[in-house]
Amino acid sequence: MKQTHLERSQKGGVWSSYLRLLSHDFPTQRAAVAEIIRLKTRLQLPKGTEYFFSDLHGEHLRFQRMLDSASGTIRDKIDTLFYSVLSPEDRDELAQVVYDPENMLRRLKKAGKLRDSWYHLTIVRLIQVLKVVSAKYTRSMVRKHMAPDFRSAIDELIYKDEDESRMEYHYAVIRAILDTGVAGDFIRAVAATIRSLSVARLHIIGDIFDRGAHPDLVMDKLIAFHDVDIQWGNHDLLWIGAAMGNEAMIANVMRQGINYNTYDLLEDGYGINLRPLSMFADSTYRDDPCEIFMPKNEFNENQFDTVDPALGAKMLKAMTIIQLKLEGQLLARRPEYDMAKRDLLSQVDFAKGTVMVDGKEHPLRDTLFPTVDPKAPLKLSPEESELMRSLVASFRHSRRLQSHIRFLMSHGSAYLKFNGNLLYHGCVPMKEDGGFDILEIEGQALSGQPLFDYIDRTTRDAVFLPYDSPEQVKARDFLWYLWCGPKSPIFGKDRMATFERAFLTDKSTHKETMNPYYQLINEEAACRSILEAFGLDPSRGHIINGHVPVKLIKGESPIKGGGRLFVIDGGMSKAYQKTTGMGGYTLIINSHSIALAQHPADVANDSASFDSPILEVVERFPKRLTVADTDESIDMHRQIEDLEHLIAAYRSGAVPEQDCQPLGPLQYD
């Protein structure tokens, strides 16, 4: 006969030890019962709203605004609540107070509007908005999102009723707030609570880093957020590899930072010492105009670290040559990657000024290579070696960067199965016939979920194994393959044409062919096949994907495979917006439906249009989803079962109760 949990607890062993540990958190039957009631009650609440962002690419102001406005859904709630009583201008003002109360209060003070009557009305209206967004939470959960100093006052106002005596009481609460001169602080606290409760869970589908000015500030925001997960993108893995000491990836990070004019990020954000590079570049390429290496300065402006464009071009050329050398060295020591043909620097005829690419000879746009030995083109010069030692030390010893990488490990993964949906950044490599493509690595033939599991393990090895051990070097080299390898699910292309774009005029050589996955997912059959391979229900589940910008101006749709897959890279990065025609997507899954918010391109961060994206409901659920319909409920049911066994153990005497004095009525909050 199968043993019950209680029988196991009575016989001692692991289960008994676990129950004794559990009894420290719930020392009496009453405490355990109260927790069961709380959990069972919560299971009946509507599920929280999930927000999905992809390819943030360092656009910290845009991301901050999207998050603060809940991608337009807060404004939508304000319009619903006050459509018949407030003008559009007043509704917009109230929305801006929620998003950015500090800035709005400053503006309104300058305009002479901050009178007691304005404060009173605004507090009343904000409380109404807060009541709506808090409806999905228990009272105790809502209190946890409130500022401690104002928790009691907010709690009183949010749960007010229409009884006349109580109305007088709540009026007195607001009057006291005004009389004590803290109305501005109170408004800030209520607005912060609204913002916090509007997004229950935040999913980042990869590529936090590169191109934009401040991925470091994006990371700070994610670290401060209450519930977030990250699926690593290839740009994230590039920075992880750089932080772990992969020299080829450090050179690539530096090259991209210079190209996109993100000196503030490198030097002030992460403390990367740029002086050795600037001195080396200025000395080595002093007489070289480096015209084809002019950085893309139009995308970012530096507040602290400005570099003359001419010097920037020299720095960019210096890092490009070093990167090509280091990547060639990496490919030489990793023949298993089968990428030797991508070592184009070794295929340059320096005397003729040409290079062989895919069997065809092409002239080079630039033939000045003062640090390249034609007999050993991949060997770093002594000065280049010294520069790389300096850069490796900067990346390895950057406390802020290392803490951000640890957060990417603790809250990130190669993929995630969540509430029946599958989240990943790039693709599931596929063949033309619709079957899964295979990556052969370490004697294993991997595809589908086992390939993603291998990526997850190896990424963690690169971070947590002893630095510079053979195993760690091997793992961090594999991160480079994930960045640009032809069968990398995180990259999803046959090549990364860095050399071709830098040195060849023939644009046909710049082409990077996408994995067949990107065509196959237009059909529902491929999406269902992927969901099944990951153990998810293909009739209910969805794939949520980033990486490849949706070109709205060319008629592309983010909805693929008959609604089974969403590509939500819409061009949050300014560098992409000319090709996408928009400013990014947010996928929103609440208890009623799945919706896409399409954000406009290049609008001012404080404009009303920024906070009014085009919202499209793409799927409505047959019934309103509750917490009981989510993955969270699995753990909650387990907790309930464990607590029931703890109560049984208390009643049998197998586990002694602590603090058994009479407690009076049970307190649920």
Image (cartoon, rainbow, N blue to C red):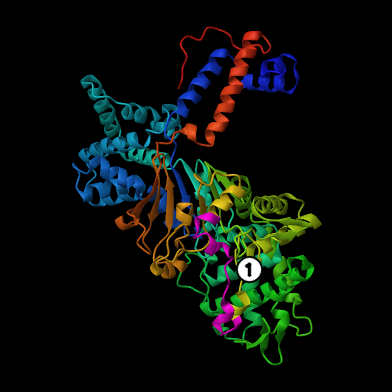
Q: Position of residue 47 (x, y in %)?
A: 44, 36
Between 422 and 312, which is closer to the camera in this rendering?
422
Q: Which residue is mark 1?
A: 252
Name the one closer to the observer, 85 or 405: 85
Q: Secondary structure at mark 1?
A: helix
Residue placed most toward the observer, 21 or 606: 21
Residue 49 found in image quarter: top left
> From this viewpoint, which residue is outermost toward the top?
662
Position in image of residue 312 (x %, y %): 56, 76
The answer to whether residue 141 is visible is yes
Give the farthest residue toward the bottom.
Answer: 352
Q: Is residue 415 left or right of residue 167?
A: right
Decide: is 415 above or below 373.
above
Rendered residue at 67%/13% (across/down): 655
Asked whether, in this view, residue 539 is left or right of residue 316, the answer is left
| Highlighted range, magenta | 503-526
Displayed quadrant of residue 445? bottom right
Rendered location of residue 417, percent (x, y): 57, 45
Q: Is residue 511 magenta?
A: yes
Q: Is residue 118 above or below residue 7?
A: below
The quadrant of the image that shows the C terminus is: top left
Given residues 73 and 559, the one toward you in this image is 559
Q: Quadrant of the N terminus?
A: top right
In the rendered image, residue 53 lying in the magenta stretch gets the answer no
Q: Quadrant of residue 41?
A: top left
* 256 left or right, relative to 109: right
Q: Is residue 112 visible?
A: no
- 371 up-or-down from 196: above or below: below
Q: Position of residue 117 (x, y in %)?
A: 20, 38
Neighbourhood count class around disc 1 (C-alpha, 10 Å): few under 14, some 14–19, many 20 upward: many
